[in-house]
Image (cartoon, grey):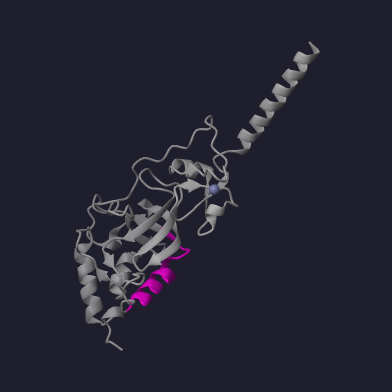
Amino acid sequence: MRKKFSVSGLTLFFLLSVLAVCRGTDVDTMVYVTNTGRRYHRENCSSLRRSRIPISLGEAAQSGYEPCSICNPPRLSENIPVPEKSGNTLYRVNVAELTLSVEAELSRMVPAEVIDHVDGDTVRVRILNAPAQVGAVETIRLIGVDTPETVHPSRPVERFGKAASDFTREGLLGKPVYLAFDWDLRDRYGRLLAYIYTGDGRCFNARIVREGYGFAYTRYPFQFMEEFRALERDARAEKQGLWGDES
Ligand SMILES: [Zn+2]
């Protein structure tokens, strides 16, 4: 009898401990992901040497990240529901039948923060409360623009590539932005295709072309193609940026 009681006591202690752990392991617990990986980690995991992006456990689970097998980060208890992703709320300018980038509505876009800069037309963003189809961390290829190459290993830096890259870094890195989408959500590399708007309501893709930091990229049709072609003509006529006289 005495022995049985002590086993029950232990069992109770064990259950209370489990309960305490479960209560601590909720959707708001911070874990860490990398720029490229599909696993989430504890803060001190060696896998985080190259990049370390904090996200909540709920977000990690929602975005399909798996727990790292090295650092064994906290997992969501199966009793705690992962918050439902909001429905198909991606704002698509083709569906809205817009013809000018300035007509897009910031309030309908997906808010994000630019966390890394790749080159003039590619950035990494962190997306809070990511809607369905979109991860918590994404690489974005800006729609409708093509900036001179800077990172190609086997070619000399293209003329103006560095300036274009700096323009995007200075204009976007660390800033809150808003994402709008178009016909195709992703390119063949899996990158998210988006228009990036800044808080002042300006379309950064359009600014790149208008200020001469890149070309209108018309190989694939997009909703603002005619506008971007006109912006490129204006930039060329005014010798903006890469259209300037060779020095
Ligand atoms: Zn890890």
- Looking at the image, which residue sits at the far bottom? 247
Q: In percent of the image, x 48 and y 63: which residue is there? A: 174
Image quadrant of residue 114? bottom left
Looking at the image, is 13 positioned above or below residue 95? Answer: above
- Comparing 173 with 71, the one in front is 71
Quadrant position of the N terminus in the picture = top right
Looking at the image, is 12 positioned above or below residue 29? Answer: above
* 12 relative position to 87: left or right: right
- Comparing 101 with 4, the one in front is 4
The main secondary structure of the magenta stretch is helix
- Looking at the image, which residue sits at the far top? 1
* 30 relative position to 39: left or right: right
Quadrant position of the C terminus in the picture = bottom left
Measured as percent of width and height from the top left, residue 194 is found at 32, 57
Measured as percent of width and height from the top left, residue 128 is found at 46, 50
Q: In percent of the image, x 35 and y 70: which residue is there? A: 153
Looking at the image, is 134 positioned above or below residue 198? Answer: above
- Looking at the image, which residue sits at the far right? 2
Magenta stretch, residue numbers: 160-177
Measured as percent of width and height from the top left, residue 142 is found at 32, 61
